[in-house]
Image (cartoon, rainbow, N blue to C red):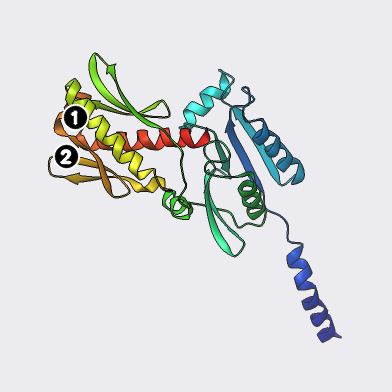
Amino acid sequence: MASRAWVSALALLPALAWAAPQQQVAIRAYINVSSGCQAETVDFLNALKAKHRPHVSLEMVDFGDRGKGLKRWQQSGHRCLTIELNGSALVKFPYASKTHAVAFQMPVGFNWTHADLEHAVQAGLQGQLRPATAAEVEAAAPPRQIRATVTTGATTVNGRRCGVVAINGNIAMYIPGAPTAAAKRAQAAAAALKSWLAKPVKMSQLTTQPVTGGWKFLAGGKGVITATAADGKAFGQSAQAVAAKWASGVKYALARANMQ
């Protein structure tokens, strides 16, 4: 009798495993609810919560309210719409026999889709959701074709005339120097970016490296512009910091262009 009871218990194991209690998934969405521009994502988040109640909790921080929500968003350090799952906006999870790494940052359609969010929550309920690194997310992201218009111009910053490189009208780079020289450097940088954008790209291809006389900003391994000691002096920063600022400015402007 004892052996039969043991066999019966074994037979129940698959059912017991299938019926294992779901894990909790806490969603905190820093999202501009007040503007109405992200209504589709707001509705999707509410539907996710309703579908998986009580295992999924949802907190929306409306940074468009010009009050408490805006203050919390600013204090969080985020610069755009961000959805955190169990405290992390960068997550990885298994799906369709692969490990997916996703950054739930920027509006839907740039870094992620609603389907990605659904799969991530499902993984979290199964205890299979983990924080990811930026490198893991970038490695998992496929190259994308970004339609963007790169232009040049000039402006004044703190009383100093600068050349500028803009992407879809958003200034990505400020280039100090005498007007003619700054304009030529801006035009050369714009030409390099246009060449890089002619095919699908990844943001990780925007890098900086030390070179003789300064720090070079590269796109796809090809030089865009070199930040010199004079550039650093003009901005009160090191040449390395100026090159990094150019790279981050282009990344942010391209992110905005990809959403348009």
Where disc 1 sits, the SS reads helix
Q: Are marks 2 and 1 in contact (CB under 8 Å)?
A: yes
Where disc 2 sits, the SS reads strand
Identify which residue is drawn at 54% across, 56% down. 100
Q: Quick check: can you spot residue 153?
A: yes
Residue placed under numbered mark 1 in the picture: 231
x and y, in percent, of residue 99 in the image: 54, 60
- Mark 1 crowdedness (10 Å alpha carbons): few <14, some 14-19, many ≥20: many
Residue found at the very far top of the displayed protein: 159
Q: Quick check: can you spot residue 236?
A: no
x and y, in percent, of residue 109 in the image: 57, 41
Asked if residue 220 lies left or right of residue 37, the reply is left
- Of 47 and 1, the residue lying toward us: 47
x and y, in percent, of residue 103 in the image: 51, 45
**Viewport quadrant of the N terminus:** bottom right
Which quadrant of the structure image shows residue 208? top left
Identify which residue is drawn at 54% across, 33% down. 81
Distance Cα–Cα, label 2 vs label 1? 9 Å
Residue placed under numbered mark 2 in the picture: 214
Query: Which mark is on residue 119?
Result: none
Identify which residue is drawn at 47% across, 28% down. 75
- The answer to whether residue 100 is above or below residue 179 is below
x and y, in percent, of residue 34 in the image: 63, 22
The amino acid sitting under disc 1 is Asp
The amino acid sitting under disc 2 is Gly
Please tell me which of labels 2 and 1 falls first in the chain. 2
